[in-house]
Image (tube, rainbow, N blue to C red):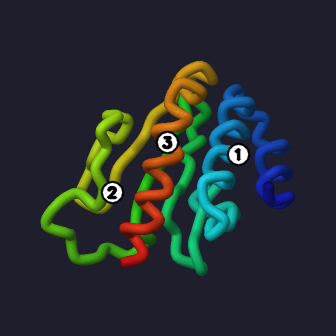
């Protein structure tokens, strides 16, 4: 895990720090292509400097969200959703933007395998 992100989160003193760290571990273990930094006031994951997943930790609520996207700039929308999600974890905002919300460490652990598949599929589909 990135030391800068650790320091940011230490200073934040978020009530869901355990959940945040568990999600960080799952995300980073899902693909060696991902690098971690801070962007938009939260942990952010990119492939070759192209943002792909951002963690929403503000305001500190009783939840953490992962935003799956294709970068900061709006792009031409694909005709269909970028990936399939048989697990139903994702709430789609556009065909290339979805959100996964977690309200407990137990929910994260329960979703771990599906989330890993989603991350791997997202990285592959968003690079095309």
Q: In which quarter of the image is the N terminus?
A: bottom right
Pick the front one: 103 or 79: 79
Quarter occupied by residue 124: bottom left
Count neighbours of disc 3 (C-alpha within 10 A) and say few if under 14, some if 14 to 19, many if 20 or more: many
Q: Which residue is drawn at 76% across and 41% down?
A: 12
The residue wearing badge 1 is 25
Q: How far apart are marks 2 and 1 (CA)?
A: 22 Å
Q: Nearer the viewer, mark 3 or mark 2?
A: 3
- Quarter of the image where the C terminus is located: bottom left
**Quick one: label 2, few (<14), some, or many (20+) residues within 10 Å?**
some
Which badge, 2 or 1, is on the more N-terminal residue?
1
Q: Which residue is drawn at 44% across and 71% down?
A: 71
Q: Real-space Cα distance between discs 3 and 2?
A: 15 Å
**Coordinates of residue 93 in the picture (x, y in percent):** 27, 50
For label 3, the SS is helix
Name the residue that disc number 3 marks: 115
Q: Single out the mark in the foreground, 2 or 1.
A: 1
Mark 1 → mark 3, Cα distance in angstroms = 12 Å
Where residue 113 appears, x then y in whole percent? 52, 37
Q: Which of marks 1 and 3 is nearer the N terminus?
A: 1
Left or right side of 74 for 44: right
- Secondary structure under tag 1 reads helix
Rendered residue at 49%/53% (across/down) = 119
The residue beneath circle 2 is 97
Q: In this view, does 30 lie above or below 50?
A: above
Q: Residues within 10 Å of mark 1 (few under 14, many from 20)?
A: few
- Which secondary structure, mark 2? strand
Task: Looking at the picture, tell me which residue is in the foreground, 55 or 28.
Answer: 28
């Amino acid at each position: 895990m990135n030391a800068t992100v650790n320091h940011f989160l230490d200073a934040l003193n978020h009530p869901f720090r355990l959940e945040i760290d568990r999600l960080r571990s799952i995300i980073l273990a899902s693909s060696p292509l991902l690098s971690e930094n801070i962007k938009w006031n939260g942990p952010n994951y990119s492939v070759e400097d192209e943002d792909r997943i951002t963690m929403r930790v503000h305001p500190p609520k009783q939840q953490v969200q992962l935003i799956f996207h294709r970068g900061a700039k709006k792009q031409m929308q694909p005709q269909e959703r970028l990936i399939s999600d048989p697990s139903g974890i994702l709430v789609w905002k556009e065909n290339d933007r979805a959100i996964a919300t977690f309200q407990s460490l137990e929910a994260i652990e329960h979703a771990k395998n599906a989330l890993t598949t989603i991350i791997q599929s997202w990285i592959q589909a968003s690079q095309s």
